[in-house]
Amino acid sequence: MLIVSLASWQRPAIDLLQSNTSANHPQLIMSEFNSASCGGVPTVSNTFAVGSLWTVDYALQMAAVGYTAAYLHTRERGISYNLFTPPDGPNGALGDWVTNPPYYALIVTAEALQTTDGAGGIVVDLNIANSKINNNATSAGYAVYDSQGVTVQQFVLFNYANISNFANASAATATFALPASAFTRKKGITVKFLSASNMYEATDIAWGGQSLAGVGNGTFENNNSSWVIPNQLLDCTHSCSLDVPAAAMAIVFAAADIQVKQEQIPTKDNKACPSSIISTALSILCVLLASLVLL
């Protein structure tokens, strides 16, 4: 709910712009955002829960209410919400860089918003578990449609559950039902996960089975740690469901022609359904969002 109200605080202006249906109507752009003003909050802004999960969630929420672009703010060395931490020493010093949680959010958001027609898409908040108004909801989700609002390109699913509130990790897992009618292909549907060793983690974060933890050159590497969730393949011929562990998020690539960057070959084929190319239109300072028209 807090993300919904935050993204909609300019509701009158959003409604005014959306009422303009002319070909050259103004675009609604967020000139600057991040997790907290004035450089963020240490141990909050630089965590997986906020820097990664929250940033993706808020970016998609802005798209859902009508923003067409948003600029993710980053600053000089030592700021807690920065994308990277440079090597010690003077500016330009040699050495390995450390990748921080918000960088993963940029990569994931780029993949979440890609469309087969390349014209940008329409993002819809699915209001899972009444998450738009329920402050206690730990699940949320979005559907990203093509530019005509007809075909689902991706489902983006969040599980914010705090494992410490449950008897075990399995009990904190969220199960999302996915309608077979939403898929233009029924088998071999790729699912990628954004996960970390815990909600407060700053470096041990993985996307699609790979991580930049301990990698100083910016090249994703395969990681087989226990907290890394490998890609999965779904069979949604009739219906299917997806389990998302806590705390983590998943992207289900529903469209047949979406090019999925397979960082890690899927190792779990969820045949029974029991319960790419990364879009480089983003600069490291700008998240392009999809709504009625993508810039």
Image (tube, rainbow, N blue to C red):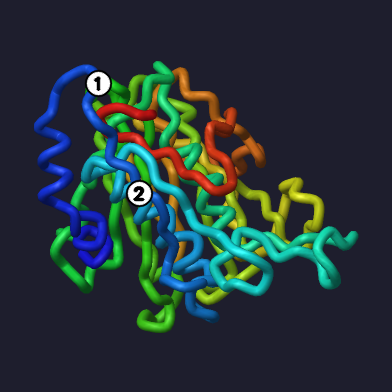
Q: Nearer the viewer, residue 157 or 133?
A: 133
Q: Which residue is mark 2?
A: 30
- How far apart are the two marked residues, 1 and 2, measured between alpha carbons? 19 Å
Viewer can see residue 245: no
Is residue 281 shown left or right of residue 177? right
Q: Residue at x 20, y 71 (%)?
A: 135
Q: Secondary structure at mark 1?
A: loop
Is residue 49 shown left or right of residue 87? left
In this view, 246 is above or below 154? below
Q: Residues within 10 Å of mark 2 (few under 14, many from 20)?
A: some
Q: Residue at x 80, y 63 (%)?
A: 91
Q: Nearer the viewer, residue 261 or 28?
A: 28
Q: Residue furthest right?
A: 94
CB atoms of marks 1 and 2 within 8 Å: no
Q: Residues within 10 Å of mark 1 (few under 14, many from 20)?
A: few
Viewer can see residue 114: yes
Q: Nearer the viewer, residue 89 or 105?
A: 89
Callout 1, which amino acid? Answer: Asn
Quarter of the picture containing the C terminus is top left
Residue 207 location in percent, x, y? 58, 50
Q: Secondary structure at mark 2?
A: strand
Callout 2, which amino acid? Answer: Met
Residue 202 location in percent, x, y? 61, 71
Q: Nearer the viewer, residue 85 or 160?
A: 85
Quarter where residue 19 is shown? top left
Q: Which residue is mark 1?
A: 24
